[in-house]
Image (cartoon, rainbow, N blue to C red):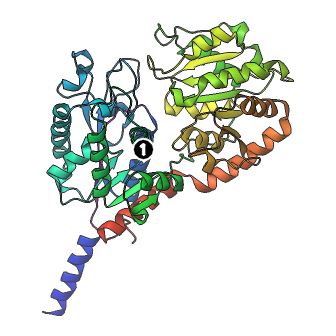
Amino acid sequence: MTDAGTLRLKEMVLEENTMQAHVVMGLMFFPRGGSAHVTRSLARELVKIGCKVTIVCGSLRIAGRPGDAREFFAGLDVRPVDYTAALEAEDPLRADPPMHPSYEDRPDAPDRIFASVDDEIYEHLVTTWMRALSDAGAAQADILHLNHLTPLNEAAARIAPHVPVVGHIHGTELLMLEAIAQGAPTGWTHAEAWAERIRHWASACQRLVVLSKTQIERLTNLMPINPERCVVISNGFDPSTFDRHEVDRIALWRQLLVEHPLGWHPDGEPGSVAYIPDELSPFAEGPVLLYVGRFTSVKRIRLLITAYALVRESFNKPAPLVLVGGFPGEWEDEHPFETIERTGARDVFLAGWHSHEELSDIFAASDVVILPSVREQFGQVLVEGMACGLPAIAVNAYGPSEIIDDGQTGWLIPPDDERALADALLEAVNDDGMRRQRGVAAYTAVRARYSWPSLGEKLARTYEAILGRPFFPDA
């Protein structure tokens, strides 16, 4: 071969090795929870690096409510599987396309728990997602990044068995597996079949992304997985969005609670819980305590309200407690509105569900972020709040135990300990110096560990290790 021919061959090899990689990301659930935010954030970082990213995702289009995949993933290549019509079906999981099942057991919810879903519906789900993945070019992709362990994994195995799969464990699947291992509740009639499927899907992944070292231990306790196949990539925050900044605090709370309320009671729509200006006087005088999240039983919102009521009279200044979240119409256990009514708790406010883009200003108008969840897989809201300079109060278990440095960046308390939670609230409110000092430490610690750009780069390096070629233009 001539020198020119040799040079051209080398150029062709270089072009092949540095060509734009195509990643298809799959998420069965419509965007409402943490895994959707993680998918969006990592996809954005991969696109910045130079990857082609296609997102296949569930979608729910209800006016005035979150869940529309095209809207949520705006600016990215998204291929939605629309569940809207399924909600009107006699059985949403038998519609076409079918509603997704859930890892949570919520009576009367359209997305009943996976462990109760029979083989016929399972095959219907797999067939639906085979079509969706095929339309997204999964068989021609370089990497399939599948969030959670769901029928998407089976669909991918059937249409693209040659494409390497990265499984992303967010934790809810582990909770269901742990419940099955302890003895499946009545109604989980297909629990063992689903447990076996999930174990098989995990074993078929080239890599498993987990949120923490704790998750590796839980994962390997549930299934025979080599820990070396696990990569710890925590959730993160966007440093350009979540940072300390000034807002007109009174004006913001007036807007969210009085002028454009989205709080809701058990029988009402968003806005059915609203306040008058005179009720906002506590916001002008003291620190604001903030909860952000869904109204599920593991979050222990009832415990938070009762602990707050226990020590409110001991505060040396007013300190309102604001509950932001609760996907409209969705709750477990006692609804927070009912807890407030039952206990007579004062200065507890329901702000309703707000978009992720609004949270930075909400954090800026607050002073402490609180998450009493007893089984929080990571603690996204803690990281984002701390990135805005807020100290955190959370349970010393699962993800929060690895995020918060007790006594330095916040308070870690035992699970389900009302007195310990009440004492942490009291100290956070009454000791201004301690609260501010821990907020400064939280800001520094989180910004050094959890930014999305660094996490996106780590994910790309994981893909490189699987493919044996670089993802970066300058690599």
Percent x, y of residue 319: 76, 23
Percent x, y of residue 206: 31, 61
In the image, what residue occupies the spot 63% across and 44% down?
387
Percent x, y of residue 221: 44, 53
Q: Quadrant of residue 341?
A: top right
Say left or right for 389 vs 221.
right
User: Residue 390: in sight, yes or no?
Assistant: no
Percent x, y of residue 438: 76, 44
353 part of magenta stretch: no
Residue 315 lies, with reference to residue 150, above or below; the image says above
Indicate the quadrant containing the C terminus: top left, top right, bottom left or bottom right: bottom left
User: Residue 52: in sight, yes or no?
Assistant: yes
Indicate the quadrant containing the N terminus: top left, top right, bottom left or bottom right: bottom left
In the image, what residue occupies the spot 16% across and 32% down?
120
Say left or right for 12 vs 447.
left
Residue type at mark 1: give it.
Answer: Leu
In the image, what residue occupies the spot 70% across and 50% down?
405
Q: Which residue is mark 1?
A: 174
Q: Quadrant of residue 208?
A: bottom left
Disc 1 packing (10 Å; few <14; some 14–19; many ≥20)? many
Q: Could you say whether the residue bearing mark 1 is in a helix, strand or loop?
A: helix
Instruction: Residue at the far left: name it.
Output: 1
Residue 143 lies, with reference to residue 403, above or below; the image says below
Say left or right for 97 vs 465.
left
Instruction: Residue at the far bottom: name it.
Output: 2
20 part of magenta stretch: yes
Q: Which residues are magenta?
A: 19-32
Figure disc tally: 1
In the image, what residue occupies the spot 41% across and 48% down?
169
Residue 258 lies, with reference to residue 1, above or below; the image says above
